[in-house]
Amino acid sequence: MNPSSQKTGVRLAQSKAWREKKKMTTQQKGLIIVESPTKAKTIGGILGSQYRIVATMGHIRDLPENEMGVKIEKNFEPKYVIMPGKKAIVANLKKAAEEHSEIYLATDEDREGEAIAWHTSYVIGKNPEEVKRVAFHEIVPEAVRDAFNSPRKISLDLVNAQQTRRILDRIVGYTISPFLGMGLSAGRVQSVALRFIVEREKEIERFVPQIYWTVKAESEKNGGRVYLTLDEINGKKIEKYDLKDAGKIDEILAELNTCTLTVTEKSETIKHITPYPPFITSTLQQESSVRLGYSSTKTMFIAQQLYEGIAIEGKNIGLITYMRTDSPSVAKIARNQAIQYIREIYGETYLPAKPHFYRSKSPSAQEAHEAIRPTSPFRTPEKMRSFLNEEQYKIYKLIWERFVASQMKEAEVSNVKLHAQNGRYGFTAVCNSVKFEGFTKLWEIKIDKGEEIVAEIQKDEVLNVLHYIKEEHQTSPPPRYTEATLIKTLEKNNIGRPSTYAPTISILLNRKYVKIEKRALIPLKIGRVVYEILMQFFTDIIKTDFTARMEDNLDRIANGERKWTDVLKEFYDAYKPLLVKAENEPDKFSKIFDRVLAEDKTCPNCKIPLTVKKGRYGLFLGCPNFPACRYRENIFNDEYNIGDKICPHCKVPLVVKRGRYGTFLACPNYPGCKYTERLKKNANYSRRRFKKQ
């Protein structure tokens, strides 16, 4: 074949391929735009080839990275730009949109999803009124088809609520960060979370332990032991920390040994323990942290995979409902499926007389949303195990068991209580035993069984006391926050929303404001500096009630009850005087840095306090007599687990340094000694960015 004929053949083949593609496009009902390829694949498996489905790969338009991007003086007008790395995606979206007359935006059902849909409509050159919005709580055939049969318009109220949050965070971040200086930054919600962590640490540091005592009677019955605790003197209840005098305890023991201990009361009650509601975002993150040791970021990442779809026998199936929700309510069809499963597997005895209904305790919860649950209770964790990796299996099992257990009968626990008297001293012992396991067959809970032998002891029985024992105890400081308890506190105080918990903690870790040690969140020096500056100059912004009121305002915008620009103006009118005050007191900032970071640090040469300085690789402590004295010291040595690392040449402790390629250990005698060593940092210092919610 000559070259001319070969070129002609190629052109004919290309023309035929183009006609086939054009024919297929013409036959398609429309274009569907989603956020991720996995979600696209799952929806495509449901709808078939009648639609073309493309993904935005998350947000595609946002405020610019190198400027505020908000014109405050022009009624808070935002400036949106295509996000870095998204130009090729936008070009493909535009081209696909030109080939279809019907465009469906099937992004997630929350405010972030609504905002992605709104931004997408603009980048493809369509008026938001021209596109069709579809949203579903679970990616299963019935829900997806129902959504496409009844599309709606983009909700500008939801978009404005998300936009207001974004603008608020940008204003706070860009206006406060210059005051912090030295590359530090502050955000609205994470600053409140940082405040909780730092103030808890301060409580721990101020804590002075106290000694207190308890008294127990060790008795024998049928070869077994039972311990009764002293809880009354002269009919008055003893509080936990009342017995603090060791001499007084000895007097009590001497008096007790002169009399007998007789059972005066025995009672039995049946406690009914109701099942826990199915998961919402915060409770899933808390239980995942406690039971599995997973971070909130990891939990949400895995849950996203389960929601968007898992390949099962050649077909993508969404295994759970949407994982960002603040409502524990359950759809009727899902509740009925759970009841059917319980009846078939466990029998009628495990079903309650009436189905359980759950509502959120938070007044701002969106009850139209649903709890996190499996899309079908009949897809048990064991049936799905071969299709899931170990982490996916554990999260799915957690969600599945919690949901099915939430529709089971109450557990029944027998509580037997003894009261015994020795003169003017009263003792008690308790025994708990499970009479009917109910929902605990699936969802294990901790039940303190107490003294099992109690059930064998009768009223008026004189106990065979072997010893009266005094036990010394010491009060403990309040525990540090874990991810689970911090999320619980944020939720309790109405701070943030389901989509914000994981990224809030991730930001604090990535900025090195806090670290995680044995699951506890511990503030680092830089975090303390940020906290001190915020508390001195911007206290109102990080007050719990201020942040909670702002969340309420965002909810009211989403419900169409408030205008978004009015909320921003109200905020900025109160916020601007704080900025002005901070601008007029610049010297106080450096004093805070020196007080927190250079406390008790002295130059060994000049015998004067070190000060905080900034070098090309970050903050360090230096002698104020520079350049006459060049002594310097790393601020962060004690915040890395470097142990007793010693320079093998100079036999002195290594210090942490920052170079162009990151953090490392080095000899402090540099440049005289150039020994360096790789630093193994805590995994929580990873710079991997959390996917934008």
Image (cartoon, helix red, strand yellow):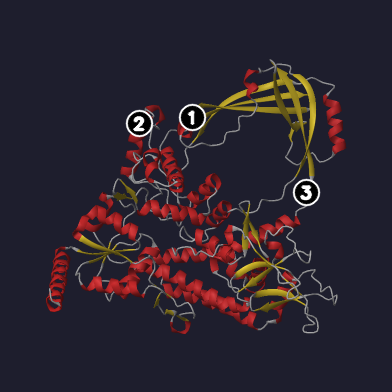
**Residue 261, horizontal then vertical, whole percent:** 76, 21
Labels in figure, total: 3
Q: Which residue is mark 3?
A: 209
Q: Who's the residue at 51% across and 48% down the image?
A: 288
Badge number at residue 428:
none
In three-dimensional space, the C-alpha distance between marks 2 and 1, rounded to whole angstroms, equals: 16 Å
Q: Earlier in the sequence, mark 2 or mark 1?
A: 2
Q: Residues within 10 Å of mark 2 (few under 14, many from 20)?
A: some
Q: Who's the residue at 48% across and 34% down the image?
A: 440
**Residue 565, horizontal then vertical, whole percent:** 43, 75
Q: Which residue is mark 2?
A: 343
Q: Who's the residue at 22% across and 74% down the image?
A: 98
- 278 over 342 or under it: above or below: below
Image quadrant where one finds the N terminus: bottom left
Q: Amino acid at mark 1?
A: Glu
User: Regarding mark 1 in the picture, which secondary structure is present there?
Assistant: loop
- Asked if disc 2 and disc 1 are in contact, CB closer than 8 Å, the reply is no
- 69 over 112 or under it: above or below: below
Q: Amino acid at mark 2?
A: Arg
Residue 517 visible: yes
Q: Residues within 10 Å of mark 3 (few under 14, many from 20)?
A: few
Q: Amino acid at mark 3?
A: Pro
User: Regarding mark 3 in the picture, which secondary structure is present there?
Assistant: loop
Q: Earlier in the sequence, mark 3 or mark 2?
A: 3
**Residue 44, horizontal then vertical, whole percent:** 26, 56
Q: Which residue is mark 1?
A: 437
Residue 157 visible: no
Left or right: 265 in relation to 24: right
